DNA sequence: TCGATTGTTTTATGACTATTGAAATGTCGC
DNA sequence: GCGACATTTCAATAGTCATAAAACAATCGA
């Protein structure tokens, strides 16, 4: 994840609808969701969803594949971890006190037998 | 860090000059830097820097204090760790494989006796 | 204390980009 | 070809960015 990619990713994440889409796709997992399903879940018009999906895909945060009539979108998990890593590299420069609290948050969200708290 | 704050933070970070400013301020630490110093370091006009500084401050990523003739800006480290935590919460939902690589990156950037690799 | 100086912010302008819904177009299975 | 699904294009609105000029705030020397 270089700076250009990170900038695009930040821009993509700075829009409420796109953030909501990404959350849906991360929750859905590798199987992904069809554009129409996303549209229903997020509650926006199909053209609007399409616009934002292409934005997210350009930013490298999601990927798409055709499956018969539907186009299935799924989250690009490596891009997401790359973005988190970029943020840590840029924001931890000599300041572990920035990453410390973040790791605490990590423990409470990624431990397999823990419930998801914040959606 | 709620969603609104995260959206503002992402928007603030999606601009190259602002990202450069933030890096300078994180590197500078709690002492911070005067606006003029930032202007020189980043290589942009003072009015342009002022514009971006106020943007970053509105987003809660930096703070300012007056010191005689200069205004000193410094990074809001809790906001940064909050943003990382938000990203982890949102992107790790049931998918520890996203945060795993991020933590690996953390080890290589926040260990006190490690050199900073990417600036 | 007055005026000059330094440091920073505000304002104004113009170019550019983002966001949106509606309408048009493309793509696939039957 | 028809119908269903998905995407693109279009036009209008709004917001962002960069530049320069002006305004503002704080300090220092005469």
Image (spheres, coloured by chain):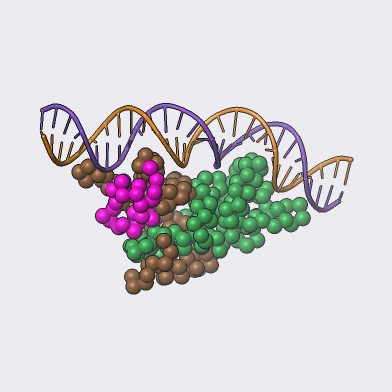
Chain colours: A green, B brown, C purple, D orange
Q: In the picture, residue A33 is in which quadrant? A: bottom right
Q: In the picture, residue B44 is in which quadrant? A: top left
Q: How many marks?
A: 0
Say if B41 sits above or below B51 in the image. Answer: below
Say if B44 sits above or below A110 in the image. Answer: above
Q: Residue B62's spot in the image, x, y percent?
A: 34, 49
Residue depicted at 60% across the width and 46% down the height: A52
Residue depicted at 27% across the width and 44% down the height: B71
The quadrant the C terminus of chain B occupies is bottom left
Q: Residue A2's spot in the image, x, y percent?
A: 51, 60
Residue depicted at 37% across the width and 72% down the height: B114
Residue B35 shown in magenta: yes
Q: Nearer the viewer, residue D18 or B75?
A: D18
Say if B110 sits above or below B53 in the image. Answer: below
Q: Which residues are magenta?
A: B22-45
Does the rendering let one see residue A56?
yes
Residue depicted at 30% across the width and 57% down the height: B29
Q: Residue A99's spot in the image, x, y percent?
A: 38, 63
Q: Dominant secondary structure of the magenta stretch?
A: helix
Q: Nearer the viewer, residue B34 or A70?
A: B34
């Amino acid at each position: 994840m270089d700076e250009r990619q990170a900038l695009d990713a930040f821009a993509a994440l700075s829009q409420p609808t796109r953030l909501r889409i990404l959350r849906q796709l991360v929750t859905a997992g590798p199987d992904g969701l069809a554009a129409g399903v996303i549209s229903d879940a997020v509650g926006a018009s199909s053209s609007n969803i399409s616009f934002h999906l292409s934005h997210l895909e350009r930013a490298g945060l999601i990927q798409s594949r055709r499956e018969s009539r539907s186009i299935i979108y799924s989250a690009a998990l490596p891009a997401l971890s790359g973005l988190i890593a970029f943020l840590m590299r840029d924001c931890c420069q000599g300041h572990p006190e920035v990453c410390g609290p973040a790791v605490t948050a990590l423990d409470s969200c990624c431990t397999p037998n823990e419930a998801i708290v914040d959606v």
